[in-house]
Image (spheres, coloured by chain):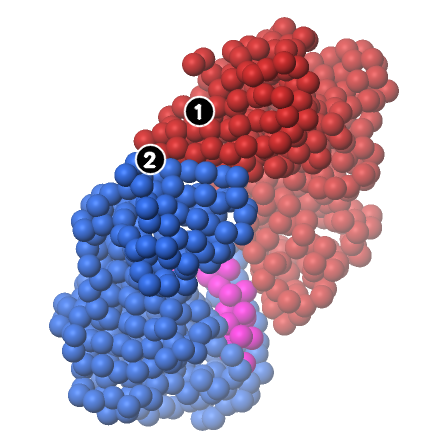
Chain colours: A red, B blue
């Protein structure tokens, strides 16, 4: 008989993380299962949604090894709802018995061989700290398209170049990129589906552990001390976006990013519902924000540091501008190339980040 | 020109409370409006959804009185998103101007006379502390039907009798009642829609302020120092429910309510999805809970105080049993009249509460 024992809390945390991957309405029944493998002094848990495979390894007291599949969400519920400290499983011919204190269950199992193997791919490798990858993906995510439109815009492009790792996303109307330094080899561009990137960011949290990224044609493997993840990549790459990033500017303003974002949020309440238009009047020493819609008008002034002549009026989609500022700490530099040509936003304290927003035609 | 001034936070809290009443998709456009009236040293704010009218009064510095209507949700958003301490309004021929710090808006207004007057009704009156009313409604709410079924089951019946106030709800399958003492006059039964009762409970929070309840044929008026609320009542009363409350019992168990509820939540994870059946095996000194479904089986034992012979097996809908226990502190007395006849649950530390659950036929 195969028996293993581990702290219930450790098991509950791992199960919760994996349940986020296992779909509640799976396209194939196998994806509703959780793969469990007891081996050496570990319990290996794995879930897949067909696009993304995630494997976690937690320490456990293993009497003898086994592999099995159990229904992922039920397993998670059982483990979370129990309140004793130790969880003990046994694989028997009747199923997997789970004892947590006085709570005893027997779950139906399925053949572990039916579960898709973890595919990490093989190819170009690069090392990156977890927090840098999380920040890069997290910062640019908003600019990817969520639905419709060309499929490639629903992804985040990862680029390797000499000493540079870049994450870039665009929906064709706005763009965000984040650069970090790495010791990289050959140049490479691959596009990760934004939804898979979201799962990766959630998993990374604030850890600083080193990660190994492995890029192959159709697959990205991410390997860290706590987990291994395999993600299906998208076909193709983003269209050439560098040409929309302006290089010369007629006016610049430096404002507190959060104060500017909050002023935008206030003024946009009365903006036109459809266009979300907000007018920014730039003049020496200040920005005046104004919006007008069906229910009235709103305006607010901010005192800011500026460079350039002005005055200059540019209208923006308030949602896009707010997204570009969200989460940015400290001062933001807002550079205008003209009233109707692209502007850039850069974080003075986060030099890797650059956003491009295009003014509305007025 | 009419001007008033008050702390932004006070205004934001009042607006948020009223926004919960004002529907986002109103059946009539007028219900999307917020009624504002400056009078004496107060600002009166009122919202209605046709079923329920709520009026709040907050202290304000009033230069000269006015009445107007503004879009409720926009007004709330504007006031919440601002960050200065004082809010200042002016009613002008162009609309309502609102200045909060450097944030200035002008909102379109509508004629205040178009707003439905606050209807509290006139009739039998009773006084009740806010916390008692909140507890009575909150305790029995779960037993009211949420959808379908006979309309009257979607209400909570309020009863007045000599020295007794009772709230009772049933969906025809289970029942909950809560008794409190009041100095009441004539006997009376009225049914409040459960959704309106939910709003009332939210408003009451934990306040102990005295409330005056006024029952008329079609209306319940609730008046407190902070607010006045008028609720449309339902037609008719609940069918005679007293006959389903068992009076003699064959077995009794006293368990910690929260421990019993948690054990039910654990075991039910593996219960049959459709029936939600959970078996309770009562025997001297213990209850064994067991469930079995498509994915396996679960069981757990609780040591409890019992009276009666046993053993006795009764099967219940786990959801119903869990609902009846939810939020109950301290010991619960579980009384069985037989394996297939109604059982009662009463809170040993909350004597006003009684739940009736009927075992499943097995």
Q: Can residue A45 be seen at all in this image of the molecule? A: yes
In this picture, residue B326 sits left or right of residue B218: right
Residue A274 placement (x, y as % from top left): 37, 26
Looking at the image, residue A122 lies above or below residue B305: above
Looking at the image, residue B105 lies above or below residue B155: above
Residue closest to the eye, A286 or A56: A286
User: Which region shows up in magenta?
Assistant: B256-275
In this picture, residue B154 sits left or right of residue B354: left
* Residue at mark 1: A277
**Alpha carbon distance from label 2 to label 1:** 14 Å
Chain bearing tag 1 is: A
> Secondary structure under badge 2?
loop
Quarter of the figure with residue A301: top right
* Residue at mark 2: A295
Q: Earlier in the sequence, mark 2 or mark 1?
A: 1
Quarter of the figure with residue B71: top left
Chain bearing tag 2 is: A
In this picture, residue B284 sits left or right of residue A330: left
- Asked if disc 2 and disc 1 are in contact, CB closer than 8 Å, the reply is no
Q: Main secondary structure of the magenta part?
A: helix
The structure residue drawn at horizontal position 38% and vertical position 69%, both measured from the top left corner, is B226
Please rate how many residues cluster around mark 2, counting C-alpha atoms within 10 Å: few if below 14, some from 14 to 19, many from 20: some
Looking at the image, residue A247 lies above or below residue B127: above
């Amino acid at each position: 008989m195969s028996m293993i024992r581990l702290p219930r809390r450790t098991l509950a945390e791992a199960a919760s993380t994996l349940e986020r991957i296992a779909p509640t309405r799976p396209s194939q029944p196998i994806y509703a299962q959780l793969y469990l493998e007891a081996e050496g002094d570990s319990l290996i848990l794995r879930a897949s949604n067909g696009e993304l495979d995630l494997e976690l390894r937690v320490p456990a007291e293993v009497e003898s090894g086994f592999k099995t599949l159990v229904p992922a969400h039920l397993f998670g519920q059982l483990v979370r709802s129990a309140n004793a400290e130790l969880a003990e499983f046994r694989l028997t011919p009747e199923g997997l018995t789970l004892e947590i204190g006085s709570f005893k269950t027997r779950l139906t199992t399925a053949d572990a061989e039916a579960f898709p193997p973890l595919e990490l791919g093989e190819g170009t490798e690069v090392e990156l700290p977890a927090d840098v990858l999380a920040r890069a993906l997290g910062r640019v995510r908003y600019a990817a398209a969520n639905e419709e439109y060309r499929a490639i815009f629903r992804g985040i492009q990862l680029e390797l170049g000499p000493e540079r790792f870049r994450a870039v996303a665009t929906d064709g109307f706005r763009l965000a990129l984040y650069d970090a330094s790495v010791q990289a080899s050959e140049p490479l561009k691959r596009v990760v589906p934004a939804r898979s990137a979201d799962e990766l960011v959630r998993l990374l949290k604030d850890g600083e552990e080193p990660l190994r990224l492995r890029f192959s044609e159709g697959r990205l493997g991410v390997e860290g001390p706590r987990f291994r993840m395999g993600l299906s990549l998208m076909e193709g790459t983003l269209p050439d976006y560098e040409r929309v990033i302006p290089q010369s500017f007629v006016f610049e303003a430096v404002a507190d990013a959060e104060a500017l974002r909050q002023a935008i949020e206030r003024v946009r309440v009365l903006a036109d519902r459809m266009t979300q238009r907000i007018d920014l009047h730039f003049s020496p020493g200040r920005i005046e924000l104004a919006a007008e819609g069906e229910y009235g008008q709103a305006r607010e002034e901010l005192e800011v540091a500026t460079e350039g002549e002005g005055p200059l009026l540019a209208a923006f989609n308030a949602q896009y501008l707010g997204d570009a500022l969200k989460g940015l700490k400290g001062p933001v530099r807002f550079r205008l190339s003209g009233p109707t040509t692209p502007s850039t936003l850069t974080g003075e304290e986060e030099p890797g980040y650059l956003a491009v927003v295009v003014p509305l035609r007025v």
